[in-house]
Amino acid sequence: MRHLPHPGALALATLCLLGCSGPRGSSTYETALAADDAQQLAETRFREEPFADQVRQGVLRQRALFDHHFAPDTARLTRLGERDLAILAEGLRESGGRIALPRGSESEDLHAARAATVSAALAARGIAPEQIAVETRPASGPGVASIDALMIRARISTAPMPQLAPSAQNSGTSTTPTSNLQ
C-alpha cells in the first residue's frame, strides 16, 4: 500500500526548494535598511549642523576661555574646554590672534598654569607660539559698546510703530519705513 504525501507537505517542500535556489539573504531588505540608515543619518546631520555652526561661530567671535572650561581648581581642560580650544585653534591657524583668558577667583599661579595649558594645547595643534597671545584681560569683541547699545534700545522702544496704508495691507508688500530705527 502506497501513501500519497499530504498536499500541504508538497507545497512546503516546493517553497523550501524555491527559497534555497534564490540569492543568499534578502538583498532588497538589506538595501532598504541601508537606505533607511542613510536617510536617518542625513536627517540627523541636517538637524544638528546649524546648531554646531552657531556654536563654532560664537566661540570664534568670543575668542575666550573661562573658568568653566577647566576642571575645578586645576589647569586641566574639560571636554567643553577641549572642544572650544579646538575650534579656536582652527580659527587661529591661518592668521593667529589672541585668546582672552580672564582671571576669575583662581590664584595667580593657577591662572598662569591655565595660560600655559592653553598655549601648549595650541602648539600641539600646530599653531606657533608667536602667532597667538593668551591674554588675561576680559573677553571682548568687535560688538557695540554697552552705552551705545542702551541708546539704540531706547531709540527703538520710543519710536512709533509705523502703520500700513489700507491698500498696502492687502497687496502683500511692506511699506514699513526703517529709517527711524537707524
Image (spheres, rainbow, N blue to C red):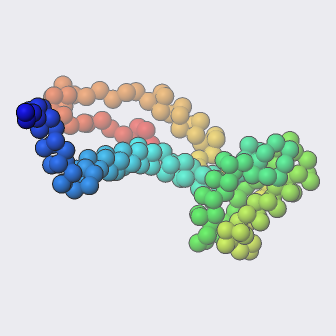
Q: In this rendering, does residue 141 appear at all?
A: no
Q: With 47 as the anchor, is 163 left or right in this view?
A: left
Residue 7, by quadrant, is top left
Q: In this rendering, does residue 45 appear at all?
A: yes
Question: Residue at position x 82%, y 62% from top?
Answer: 116
Spot occupied by residue 86 in the image (x, y as percentages of width and height): 63, 59
**165 w.r.t. 118: above or below:** above
Q: With 77 as the anchor, is 38 left or right in this view?
A: left
Q: In which quadrant is the N terminus drawn?
A: top left
**Depth check, front residue: 31 or 68:** 31
Question: Residue at position x 73%, y 63% from top?
Answer: 121
Question: Residue at position x 82%, y 52% from top?
Answer: 75
Q: In which quadrant is the C terminus drawn?
A: top left
Q: Residue furthest front?
A: 1
**171 w.r.t. 78: above or below:** above
Q: With 64 as the anchor, is 10 left or right in this view?
A: left
**Depth check, front residue: 161 or 128:** 128
**Depth check, front residue: 79 or 89:** 79
Question: Residue at position x 67%, y 68% from top?
Answer: 125
Q: With 13 as the anchor, is 148 left or right in this view?
A: right
* Number of marks present in the image shown: 0
**Depth check, front residue: 115 or 173:** 115
Spot occupied by residue 95 in the image (x, y as percentages of width and height): 61, 71
Spot occupied by residue 73 in the image (x, y as percentages of width and height): 86, 44
